[in-house]
Amino acid sequence: MPEPRLISSYLTVLAAQLPASIVEELADGLAETHRSYLRQGMAPDLAARSAVAEFGEPELIVAGFARVNPARRAARRLLGIGPAVGACWIAALVTSRAWGVPLPGCMLAVLALAAVIALLATSALGTRYRLAARTGAAGFLGVIALDASLIAGVAFAGVPLTWVVAMAMAASAARICYAVRALRPALAG
Amino acid sequence: MRAEELKGHLDAMLLASLEGGPQHGYAVIEALRQSTGGRLDLPTGTIYPALRRLEQAGLITGSWSVVGGRRRREYRLTPAGDRALSGRRADWLDFSAMVTAALEGGPCPNPA
């Protein structure tokens, strides 16, 4: 039996804002709801209207999924741990007297950090699923690049490996692992 | 019963609906309707994000199968979900006994 047009339109609205796997699950639930109304003896069009009404406003469903978006949650966590990792690096650079970065390099690093924070904040506060996933993915890539640059920079600059430097490198390595894990679901969104 | 009244209890109700075995989203909703005597007034579509939230929390796990040519996601309780359900059920029984005693003026039974 072909899918009623009302149900197709409803799913099209959801598909514009949600990942395909979520829409597939919703489509199955909506088809089951429709079938249950048909079994009660309703005409197909009325059954479709009843099923769509029972499912609720698409905006309500999209907002519900936006709240459980894994990219949004990961972005919040990365923003939360950011100051602690930053403090580790400040302590490492101060105790090692490793301030020899030229001004353009410093400015580039600050701009890159600001861009990553902006991307993560957009994802963390996002109420649109796809936007939150995409900005999150870009932010996670930024975090990976920043942390990898810090680790590589310290290693190549020959900064003595004190326990403070080691702690900062470990914090960045842990953050890279977390960002890599968060990247896959974000890219799927 | 409306969504705002269910706040804080929906998760436990969803876990309880999966206690009997794996269910897909629509079956979970039907089980909830039956167990609440049809008093649950919740847009069906809002159950799905709640199931995803429980999955992310590790309390349930989802897997795909194909039924009638359509992909279907089924959920089952994890051991952590089973423990969480037992805990929430015990908490609710204590809480409801306390409120009932306060509203009806009777003695509050000691928690188990």
Image (tube, rainbow, N blue to C red):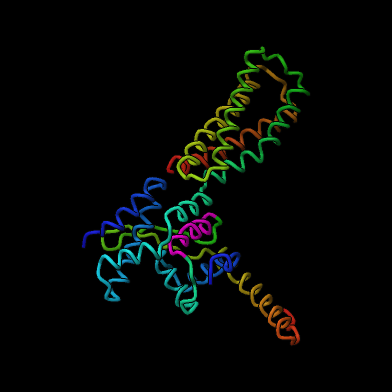
Residue at the extreme bottom of the image, as rendered:
B106
Q: Quadrant of residue A51?
A: bottom left
Number of numbered labels in the structure image:
0
Residue B53: say if magenta: yes
- Residue, far left: A1
Q: Is residue B98 above or below residue A179?
A: below
Report the quarter where the C terminus of chain B lies: bottom right
Residue A133 on image: x %, y %:
48, 41
Q: Nearer the viewer, residue A170 or A105?
A: A105
Identify the residue shown where x is 57% and y is 65%: B4
The answer to which quarter of the image holds residue A148 is top right
Give the main secondary structure, helix, strand or loop, of the magenta stretch: helix
* Magenta residues, start to end: B43-56
Is residue B99 toward the left or the right of residue A177 in the image? right
Estimate the x, y position of residue B66 in percent, counting from the top left. 31, 59
Residue nearest the viewer, comparing A130 with B86: A130
Nearer to us in this view, A81 or A110: A110
User: Where in the figure is residue A76, as x and y percent of width and height?
Assistant: 60, 43
Q: Residue at x 74, y 86 (%)?
A: B105
Q: Position of residue A68 (x, y in %)?
A: 52, 51
Q: Residue at x 53, y 69 (%)?
A: B2
- Compared to A168, does B2 lie above or below? below
Would residue A144 be counted in the magenta stretch? no
